[in-house]
Every structure is written in C-alpha cells, then in structure tokens.
Amino acid sequence: MLGQDTFFAPEIQWWHLSPLIALVAGALFLLVVGALTPRWPRGLYGVVTALTAATAAVLAVFQWHAVDDDGAEPIAAGAIAFDHLSQLLTITICAATLLVALITIDELHRSGRDAPEMYAMFLVASAGGVVMASANDLIVLFLGLETLSLALYVLAASDRNRAASQESGIKYFILGGFASAFFLYGIALVYGGTGSTNISEIIGSFVGSVSIDGDSPFVLAGLALLIVGLGFKVAAVPFHVWTPDVYQGSPTNVTAFMASVGKAAAFAAMLRVLVIALPFLRDDWRPAIWMLALLSLVVGSILAVVQTDVKRMLAYSSISHAGFILVGVEAAGHDSTGDGMPSVVTYLLLYAVLTVGSFGVVTLVGRSNGGDTSLDAFKGFAQRRPAVALALTVFLLAQAGVPFTSGFIAKWGVIQAAVEEESYAIGIIAMVAAVIAAFLYLRIMVNTWLADSDDGVEREAVPFASGLSIGLAAAFTLFVGVWPGWLLDAADTVTQYAR
C-alpha cells in the first residue's frame, strides 16, 4: 500500500513545450554567459536574441503540425493548452520579438548601452506571453502575466539617462500592480464559485451541474474583476490612462515591444478567460466587452487626432486598435466557432508586425533629432531617408485600413465577424472610428513627404539592423495585404482549442 508521502510526477511533453523552453534558454544564456565573458562584438547580443526568437517560432510551426496530427489537448497535467490558438500566438510573439531585437541593436549601440540585460528581458517577457497564450489554468495564466508585466516594468524604466523613462516605469508599475490585484482577486472568486482554477474543470463545473438559483455571485463578481484586470492589460478605455505616458516615456524600442508582444499576450489571456473558460456567462460579459470596444474606438480615435507627439499619437492609436480587436472578441462571444476568434488572432499578428515597423521608424527619427518625436521632427524625413519614409507610409496606410495592406485584412475581419453575428451597431461605429483615425495617419504622412525641414536636408544612412527590421515588416504588411488566404486559412483552425 502506498504511503501518503508518495509523489507521482505528472507526465511532461517536453517536445510540445519546446518553443517556451527555447525562449527561457536564450534568456538564461544571455544573462549567464554575458555576465561571465567580456563584452561581445557589436550587435551579437541582439543577433542571439533574434535567432532565439526565430528558433522558437520555427519550433511552434512544428508544434502546429503536431496538433494537426494528434489533435488539441491539455498537457502538463492539464496546466497548458496544446492547440492551434497557442501556437499561432506563439509565432506572433516570437515574430515581434525578432523585429524588436533588430531595432534594439542600433539603438543600444548609439547610446553606448550595448549589454545583454535588455535582450534577456525581451526573451523573459516573450516567455511570459507564450505562457499566457497557452495557459489552461488561471493560476498558470497569472504567472505568465506577472512574468510579462515585471519584465515590461523594468524595460520601461531601462533608460537611466532620461527622467521620462523612470517616470513611465513607476507609473506602469503602480497601475499594473493594481490591475494584477484585480485579476488575482477575480481568479480567487471564480475558484470559490467553481471549485477549480483549471479551465477544463471550470467548463466541467458548468456542464455537470445546474444551479436553480442562477449563476453563482462569486463567479459573476470574479468575472467582473477579471475584465477589469484584462482591460488594463489590453489598454481599453477607461483602463487606458497609463498608455500615453508610458508609451511616450519608454525607450521607443521598448514601446514597440509593449505595443506588439504585450497586446498580443493580453488579448490571448482574454480569449482564454472569456471565450474558452467562461462561455456559459457570455450573456454577462459580452455587453461589458461591447461597451469597452465602443469607448476604446471613440476615445482612442478622437484623442489621437489632437496629439502633437507621434509616440503619443500611436499610443492613442493602439487604444483604438484595441477597440477593433474587442469587436472581434465580442463577436466570439456570440459563437466561439464563428469568425470572431480567427479575426482576433489574425488582427494580433498583423498589428504586431506593422506596429513594430512603425515604432522602428519613429526610433530613427528620434535618433536624428535628439530624441524629439514630435510631428515637426518628421519634416523633411522623406528627403533624408526616402526608403524608410516609404515604409512608414505603408505602415500608416495599413493602420488606416487601406486595401492591399494587412491592416485592411485585419479590420475587415473583425467588422465582418461582428456583422455576421448581427452586431451591426458596433460594426458601424468601428468603420466611423477608422475614418476618424485616418486623419491622424494623414497628418504624419503630410509632415513626412510635403513639409520641409527647418534645418535643411541631408541624406542619412539607415543602420543595417533597423533597416532590415523595418524592411521585413513593410514587406510582410504588403504581402499579406495582397495574398492573405494562407493566413486566414490558418486562423480558421484556432476555434479547435484544447478543453
């Protein structure tokens, strides 16, 4: 007879966890080897980071085919969901990390701060995002959330020579701590109402029993707190107040990382919690998501137009984009097997790439103007760096939703999903918000191409790594805009998630 102290270790499918292991191994390698060896040659830290992210993305592609062969299922004692949704979001996070690492190479070299710490934080944050995208347990999801958040707090305050960076870090830390507390308390209440934090068991608690007194007040209160915590992480109005200051104050390459990886991971968590774990409460959470989408679309678009700093413009633009993604989440609340979830993950991938490209260009502009990223700093930019200005135009047109760019595919997808579920009002509001936001992108393009610089014009060379990142992002933005079928077909499979 077995004693009470007998321990049975769960079976771990290490191969299925290989993308996450690659990211963690890369971070540890940079920290340990970087600390024990002399300073590496210029750019080598960034190259290792980019190669690590690329390796994790390739491994995620292999796992995608493994899901095709074996089907979606929970692994690691039910703590991790092994499905197409987790793998596609892992690829999204790794692609954005790769592009940001390339931009960071030139940025750190210029400032004389070339060291492994920032790159390691990128990989740690990416690992946290992958955990959020793959979590099949609310506690595991919270651990991923905190891993991502703590790394982002450090990254936001990483430029010790700028007071604005320190200020953004402390603001993000304080408000992020409150949001994490709401989220954790929500998990506790959901546990009190369902008896488990495991998503599969939470679903089973609703399927296996019927409450004659209605839904548990613990679960409903927990749901409300979870929405508050997630609303902060996705920068949805009215939980957006941290976004403009943090985006503007952080180093621009860190802002690119937050706007891409951070947003993708946060919406991955929202899909796991609302659409997958709590679909039986869709009538309770869908109106809240509808209102968050409405406020984010309207407030983000209008306030973006009146800004004079491009980083703040793109910060409010990211709030508007969060509203568009929430339109897709609301549509997924009607029917989790419809077009809502595919439209959300498609939007996340496309937006992650083009926003990294956009902030990559802003990095080059700020570098040429002593850190100034105002609209005036973009005057004459097309004459100094015409190829980069052309890439910026591609990104801005994509964010405006112009046809033959990836942005059109993304916005069309979420609006179509809303219309198919007969959410006509929010679909119309989204289209109006897109028209308003187009003026914002037009302002930047006018200053870039038509306004002359007050200091004269002299052609400037484009740093190789930054140029490569921006070029890859621009090529992908146009490629998907012209040939989106392969991505849309892949996204359609995310509704077959692990339970």
Image (cartoon, rainbow, N blue to C red):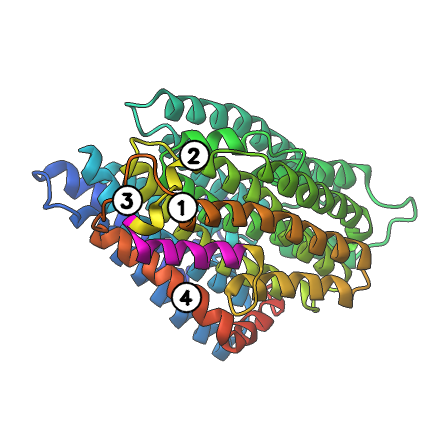
Q: Main secondary structure of the magenta part?
A: helix
Task: Please name the residue shown 40% across and 60% down the image.
Answer: 17
In front: label 2 or label 1 = 2
In front: label 3 or label 1 = 1
In front: label 4 or label 2 = 2
In front: label 2 or label 3 = 2
Pick whichever of labels 3 and 4 is earlier in the sequence: 3
Pointer 1: residues within 10 angstroms few (<14), some, or many (20+)?
many
Residue 293 location in percent, x, y? 70, 47
Pick whichever of labels 3 and 1 is earlier in the sequence: 3
Marks 4 and 2, how far apart at CA: 27 Å
Q: Is residue 111 above or below residue 70?
A: above
Q: Is residue 18 visible?
A: no
Marks 3 and 1, how far apart at CA: 11 Å
Quadrant containing the C terminus is: bottom right
Residue 327 location in percent, x, y? 69, 54
Pointer 3: residues within 10 angstroms few (<14), some, or many (20+)?
many
The span picked out in magenta is 384-399
Q: Which of these two is toward me, 340 or 462?
A: 462
Marks 2 and 3, how far apart at CA: 21 Å
The dot on residue 476 is 4
Residue pointed to by mark 1: 359
Residue 26 location in percent, x, y? 26, 50
Residue 157 location in percent, x, y? 37, 27
Magenta span has 73?
Answer: no
Pick whichever of labels 4 and 1 is earlier in the sequence: 1
The dot on residue 374 is 2
> How many marks overall?
4
Marks 2 and 1, how far apart at CA: 13 Å
Residue pointed to by mark 3: 104
Marks 4 and 1, how far apart at CA: 16 Å
Residue type, numbered disc 4: Phe
